[in-house]
Image (cartoon, rainbow, N blue to C red):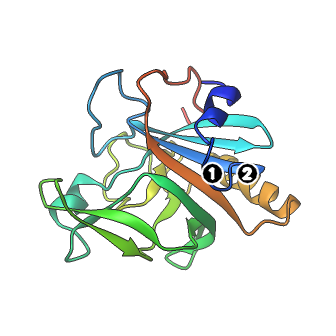
């Protein structure tokens, strides 16, 4: 999974020329041909800053506990595939992270995880820290979360993910970056090295 392969997935997408781009691969750390699992860090988030690429163990789906008992009466949110613009955000008013800066499409899930409907709007979808266990616990009702062996927003893992993105945005006078969420293509294999293991 090299830069050329990743760049090929951006062809025809908006903001493809941004010096700061993130990608989410649903099922990116699952064995080839396996179905996407909920509740584990089986997904992959890729950070591309000025051509330098890092890979992060992540989860891009809502936690099973919050699918079964959603915080929103319409059901847990599952971010739809596509390019979403993200900017600096404070989760719960205190945790620095990145959050949606435009309306997005989400699938609303039933208590058993099937898609009930698709909605468009501002749902507070963020890219933020998760926790240390492989189980995502209750850390996401639809956000994209980075596995953090140092605990929820713990150092140094969260800073290692967050700070380079923030600094690159500042260096390029950008207020947002594009985040491309997709399903892991069958032709791609997971990277051999993850920053947060």
| Position of 132 relative to 114 (above/below) | above
Q: Measured from the top left, where is residue 156 in percent x and y?
A: 65, 47
Q: Which mark is residue 20?
A: 2
Badge 2 marks a residue whose secondary structure is strand
Residue in front for this viewpoint, 27 or 158: 27
Quarter where residue 72 is shown = bottom left
Q: Measured from the top left, where is residue 48 in percent x and y?
A: 70, 42
| Position of 29 relative to 101 (above/below) | above
The C terminus, quarter of image: top right
Q: Earlier in the sequence, mark 1 or mark 2?
A: 2
Specify few, some or many for label 1: CA neighbours under 10 Å numbering under 14, 14-19, or 20 or more. Answer: few
Residue in front for this viewpoint, 117 or 175: 117
Residue 130 visible: no
Specify few, some or many for label 2: CA neighbours under 10 Å numbering under 14, 14-19, or 20 or more. Answer: many
Residue receiving disc 1: 155
The N terminus, quarter of image: top right
Residue in front for this viewpoint, 152 or 87: 87
Badge 1 marks a residue whose secondary structure is loop
Q: Residue at x 57, y 30 (%)?
A: 194
Q: Residue at x 35, y 22 (%)?
A: 31
């Amino acid at each position: 999974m090299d830069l050329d392969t990743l760049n090929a997935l951006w062809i025809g997408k908006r903001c493809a020329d941004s010096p700061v781009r993130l990608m989410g691969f649903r099922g990116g750390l699952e064995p080839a041909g396996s179905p996407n699992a909920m509740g584990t860090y089986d997904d992959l988030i890729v950070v591309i800053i000025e051509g330098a690429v890092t890979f992060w163990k992540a989860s891009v789906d809502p936690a099973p506990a919050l699918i079964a008992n959603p915080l929103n009466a319409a059901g847990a949110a599952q971010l739809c595939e596509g390019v979403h613009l993200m900017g600096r955000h404070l989760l719960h008013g205190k945790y620095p992270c990145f959050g949606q800066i435009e309306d997005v499409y989400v699938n609303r899930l039933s208590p058993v995880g099937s898609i009930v409907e698709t909605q468009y709007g501002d749902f507070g979808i963020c890219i933020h820290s998760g926790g240390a266990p492989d189980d995502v616990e209750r850390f996401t009702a639809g956000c994209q979360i980075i596995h953090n062996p140092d605990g929820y927003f713990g150092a140094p893992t969260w800073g290692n993910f967050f700070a380079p993105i923030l600094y690159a945005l500042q260096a390029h006078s950008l207020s947002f970056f594009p985040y491309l969420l997709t399903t892991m293509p069958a032709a791609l294999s997971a990277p051999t090295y993850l920053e947060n293991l």
